[in-house]
Amino acid sequence: NAGVMQNPRHLVRRRGQEARLRCSPMKGHSHVYWYRQLPEEGLKFMVYLQKENIIDESGMPKERFSAEFPKEGPSILRIQQVVRGDSAAYFCASSGGLGNEQYFGPGTRLTVT
Amino acid sequence: GENVEQHPSTLSVQEGDSAVIKCTYSDSASNYFPWYKQELGKGPQLIIDIRSNVGEKKDQRIAVTLNKTAKHFSLHITETQPEDSAVYFCAASKGSGGSNYKLTFGKGTLLTVNP
Protein backbone atom coordinates (compact mmCIF):
# COMPACT_ATOMS: atom_id res chain seq x y z
CA ASN A 1 0.00 0.00 0.00
CA ALA A 2 2.27 2.75 -1.31
CA GLY A 3 1.98 6.18 0.18
CA VAL A 4 2.47 9.48 -1.60
CA MET A 5 5.48 9.26 -3.91
CA GLN A 6 7.65 12.20 -4.87
CA ASN A 7 10.64 12.36 -7.15
CA PRO A 8 13.31 13.29 -7.38
CA ARG A 9 14.13 13.39 -3.67
CA HIS A 10 16.95 15.83 -4.26
CA LEU A 11 17.33 18.22 -7.18
CA VAL A 12 20.16 20.62 -7.89
CA ARG A 13 19.68 23.33 -10.48
CA ARG A 14 21.74 26.31 -11.55
CA ARG A 15 20.13 29.73 -11.59
CA GLY A 16 18.02 30.17 -14.71
CA GLN A 17 17.31 26.46 -15.24
CA GLU A 18 13.95 24.76 -14.93
CA ALA A 19 12.93 22.44 -12.11
CA ARG A 20 10.23 19.79 -12.46
CA LEU A 21 8.95 18.09 -9.35
CA ARG A 22 6.66 15.07 -9.58
CA CYS A 23 4.06 13.72 -7.18
CA SER A 24 2.02 10.53 -7.35
CA PRO A 25 -0.85 10.54 -4.85
CA MET A 26 -1.85 7.60 -2.71
CA LYS A 27 -3.91 4.98 -4.49
CA GLY A 28 -7.51 6.07 -4.66
CA HIS A 29 -6.75 9.73 -3.91
CA SER A 30 -7.72 12.33 -6.48
CA HIS A 31 -6.83 15.53 -4.58
CA VAL A 32 -3.27 16.86 -4.57
CA TYR A 33 -1.78 19.74 -2.60
CA TRP A 34 1.67 21.29 -2.90
CA TYR A 35 3.43 22.99 0.02
CA ARG A 36 6.83 24.66 0.33
CA GLN A 37 9.01 24.53 3.42
CA LEU A 38 11.81 27.02 3.87
CA PRO A 39 14.56 26.33 6.44
CA GLU A 40 13.37 26.82 10.04
CA GLU A 41 9.83 27.50 8.79
CA GLY A 42 6.53 25.68 8.68
CA LEU A 43 4.95 24.53 5.47
CA LYS A 44 3.26 27.10 3.24
CA PHE A 45 0.35 26.17 0.97
CA MET A 46 0.98 26.69 -2.72
CA VAL A 47 -1.71 25.02 -4.82
CA TYR A 48 -4.57 22.53 -4.68
CA LEU A 49 -5.43 20.41 -7.72
CA GLN A 50 -7.84 17.72 -8.74
CA LYS A 51 -7.49 15.68 -11.89
CA GLU A 52 -7.14 18.13 -14.81
CA ASN A 53 -8.22 21.08 -12.66
CA ILE A 54 -6.50 23.73 -10.56
CA ILE A 55 -8.86 24.43 -7.69
CA ASP A 56 -6.87 26.98 -5.67
CA GLU A 57 -3.50 28.45 -6.59
CA SER A 58 -3.60 31.38 -4.17
CA GLY A 59 -0.26 30.38 -2.62
CA MET A 60 1.66 30.16 -5.88
CA PRO A 61 4.04 32.95 -6.87
CA LYS A 62 2.54 34.82 -9.81
CA GLU A 63 5.49 34.21 -12.10
CA ARG A 64 7.70 31.23 -12.96
CA PHE A 65 5.63 28.67 -11.01
CA SER A 66 2.98 26.40 -12.48
CA ALA A 67 1.31 23.14 -11.55
CA GLU A 68 -0.72 20.51 -13.28
CA PHE A 69 -2.40 17.20 -12.48
CA PRO A 70 -3.20 15.49 -15.79
CA LYS A 71 -5.76 12.78 -16.31
CA GLU A 72 -2.95 10.24 -16.55
CA GLY A 73 0.32 10.43 -14.66
CA PRO A 74 1.65 12.33 -11.68
CA SER A 75 1.10 15.91 -10.64
CA ILE A 76 3.91 18.21 -11.75
CA LEU A 77 5.16 21.37 -10.05
CA ARG A 78 7.25 23.35 -12.52
CA ILE A 79 9.55 26.20 -11.64
CA GLN A 80 11.03 28.12 -14.55
CA GLN A 81 14.21 30.19 -14.41
CA VAL A 82 14.97 29.17 -10.83
CA VAL A 83 16.59 31.65 -8.44
CA ARG A 84 18.44 31.00 -5.17
CA GLY A 85 15.34 31.96 -3.19
CA ASP A 86 13.53 28.95 -4.67
CA SER A 87 15.80 26.62 -2.67
CA ALA A 88 13.48 24.79 -0.29
CA ALA A 89 11.78 21.49 0.39
CA TYR A 90 8.65 21.00 -1.68
CA PHE A 91 6.07 18.61 -0.30
CA CYS A 92 3.08 17.08 -1.97
CA ALA A 93 0.07 15.79 -0.05
CA SER A 94 -2.97 13.88 -1.21
CA SER A 95 -6.41 13.20 0.11
CA GLY A 96 -9.37 11.11 -0.87
CA GLY A 97 -11.64 14.11 -1.12
CA LEU A 98 -12.70 17.31 0.51
CA GLY A 99 -12.94 16.98 4.26
CA ASN A 100 -10.41 14.17 4.40
CA GLU A 101 -6.99 14.03 5.95
CA GLN A 102 -3.95 15.07 3.93
CA TYR A 103 -1.07 12.61 3.72
CA PHE A 104 2.36 13.90 2.77
CA GLY A 105 5.10 12.53 0.58
CA PRO A 106 8.81 12.55 1.50
CA GLY A 107 9.43 15.81 -0.32
CA THR A 108 11.82 17.08 -2.97
CA ARG A 109 14.70 19.16 -1.72
CA LEU A 110 15.57 21.73 -4.35
CA THR A 111 18.93 23.45 -4.22
CA VAL A 112 19.65 26.30 -6.60
CA THR A 113 23.34 27.09 -7.07
CA GLY B 1 -5.92 35.09 6.21
CA GLU B 2 -5.41 32.49 8.91
CA ASN B 3 -2.40 32.79 11.22
CA VAL B 4 -1.20 29.96 13.45
CA GLU B 5 1.23 30.56 16.30
CA GLN B 6 3.02 27.61 17.91
CA HIS B 7 4.91 27.43 21.21
CA PRO B 8 7.46 26.51 22.34
CA SER B 9 9.86 26.39 19.41
CA THR B 10 12.04 23.86 21.25
CA LEU B 11 11.16 21.47 24.05
CA SER B 12 13.46 19.08 25.88
CA VAL B 13 12.06 16.45 28.25
CA GLN B 14 13.29 13.38 30.05
CA GLU B 15 12.12 9.99 28.86
CA GLY B 16 8.86 9.12 30.58
CA ASP B 17 7.84 12.73 31.16
CA SER B 18 4.95 14.45 29.39
CA ALA B 19 5.28 17.02 26.64
CA VAL B 20 2.77 19.72 25.76
CA ILE B 21 2.80 21.88 22.63
CA LYS B 22 0.36 24.74 22.21
CA CYS B 23 -1.05 26.53 19.18
CA THR B 24 -3.34 29.47 18.68
CA TYR B 25 -5.21 30.41 15.53
CA SER B 26 -6.73 33.64 14.37
CA ASP B 27 -9.67 32.71 12.14
CA SER B 28 -12.73 31.67 14.10
CA ALA B 29 -14.03 29.92 10.96
CA SER B 30 -11.26 27.31 11.14
CA ASN B 31 -12.73 23.92 11.91
CA TYR B 32 -10.04 21.29 11.36
CA PHE B 33 -6.81 21.01 13.37
CA PRO B 34 -4.29 18.29 12.51
CA TRP B 35 -0.90 17.61 14.10
CA TYR B 36 2.05 16.35 12.13
CA LYS B 37 5.35 14.78 13.18
CA GLN B 38 8.34 15.36 10.93
CA GLU B 39 11.55 13.42 11.34
CA LEU B 40 14.79 14.63 9.80
CA GLY B 41 14.78 14.29 6.02
CA LYS B 42 11.22 12.97 5.89
CA GLY B 43 7.79 14.29 5.08
CA PRO B 44 5.25 15.29 7.75
CA GLN B 45 3.32 12.37 9.20
CA LEU B 46 -0.23 12.91 10.41
CA ILE B 47 -0.42 11.73 14.02
CA ILE B 48 -3.76 13.04 15.26
CA ASP B 49 -6.41 15.56 14.30
CA ILE B 50 -9.47 17.16 15.80
CA ARG B 51 -12.51 18.84 14.36
CA SER B 52 -14.32 21.77 15.88
CA ASN B 53 -17.30 19.76 17.04
CA VAL B 54 -15.28 18.01 19.78
CA GLY B 55 -13.11 19.32 22.60
CA GLU B 56 -10.70 16.44 23.08
CA LYS B 57 -9.41 13.39 21.24
CA LYS B 58 -7.03 10.72 22.43
CA ASP B 59 -5.03 8.00 20.71
CA GLN B 60 -2.86 5.94 23.05
CA ARG B 61 -0.12 8.26 24.38
CA ILE B 62 -1.22 11.22 22.26
CA ALA B 63 -4.11 13.57 22.94
CA VAL B 64 -5.27 16.84 21.47
CA THR B 65 -7.52 19.42 23.14
CA LEU B 66 -9.38 22.26 21.47
CA ASN B 67 -10.75 25.46 23.02
CA LYS B 68 -12.81 27.19 20.34
CA THR B 69 -13.63 30.17 22.51
CA ALA B 70 -9.99 30.95 23.15
CA LYS B 71 -8.98 29.75 19.69
CA HIS B 72 -6.22 27.49 20.87
CA PHE B 73 -5.44 23.79 20.71
CA SER B 74 -2.75 21.66 22.30
CA LEU B 75 -0.91 18.40 21.74
CA HIS B 76 -0.17 16.25 24.76
CA ILE B 77 2.28 13.36 24.64
CA THR B 78 2.51 11.21 27.75
CA GLU B 79 5.24 8.72 28.73
CA THR B 80 7.59 10.15 26.11
CA GLN B 81 10.12 7.89 24.42
CA PRO B 82 13.32 8.74 22.53
CA GLU B 83 11.58 7.86 19.26
CA ASP B 84 9.13 10.71 19.92
CA SER B 85 12.01 13.11 19.19
CA ALA B 86 11.08 15.07 16.04
CA VAL B 87 9.64 18.37 14.88
CA TYR B 88 5.92 18.67 15.52
CA PHE B 89 3.68 20.98 13.49
CA CYS B 90 0.17 22.11 14.24
CA ALA B 91 -2.10 23.29 11.45
CA ALA B 92 -5.54 24.75 10.91
CA SER B 93 -7.94 24.98 8.02
CA LYS B 94 -11.48 26.06 7.25
CA GLY B 95 -13.96 25.46 4.56
CA SER B 96 -17.56 24.97 3.74
CA GLY B 97 -19.35 21.73 3.13
CA GLY B 98 -16.71 19.74 4.97
CA SER B 99 -13.79 20.88 2.82
CA ASN B 100 -10.53 21.30 4.68
CA TYR B 101 -7.86 22.08 2.18
CA LYS B 102 -5.25 24.80 2.46
CA LEU B 103 -3.67 23.93 5.78
CA THR B 104 -2.00 26.84 7.59
CA PHE B 105 0.92 25.55 9.65
CA GLY B 106 2.66 26.74 12.76
CA LYS B 107 6.43 27.10 12.65
CA GLY B 108 7.05 23.85 14.46
CA THR B 109 8.36 22.58 17.79
CA LEU B 110 11.59 20.60 18.01
CA LEU B 111 10.95 17.98 20.69
CA THR B 112 13.95 16.20 22.17
CA VAL B 113 13.38 13.27 24.51
CA ASN B 114 16.50 12.52 26.53
CA PRO B 115 17.05 8.88 27.57
Image (cartoon, rainbow, N blue to C red):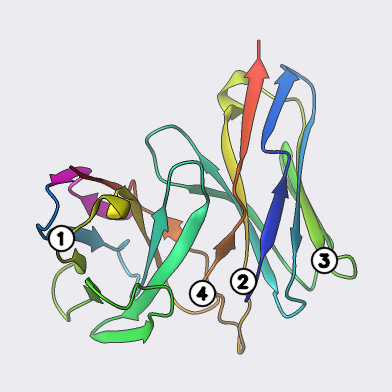
The structure residue drawn at horizontal position 63% and vertical position 77%, both measured from the top left corner, is B94
Q: Is residue B19 left or right of residue B93?
A: right
Residue B16 appears at what percent x and percent y?
Answer: 76, 19
Task: For marks 4 and 3, give the one nearer the viewer.
Answer: 3
Residue B71 appears at what percent x and percent y?
Answer: 82, 66
Q: Is residue A75 magenta?
A: no
> Do badges 2 and 1 share one subunit?
no
Q: Which residue is mark 4?
A: B101
Q: Secondary structure at mark 3?
A: loop
Q: Which residue is mark 1?
A: A20
Residue A1 can be seen, yes or no? no
In which chain is the residue bearing label 4? B
Q: Which residue is mark 3?
A: B71
Q: Nearer the viewer, residue A56 or A64?
A: A64
Specify the amino acid type for callout 4: Tyr
Question: Mark 3 or 2 closer to N-term?
Answer: 3
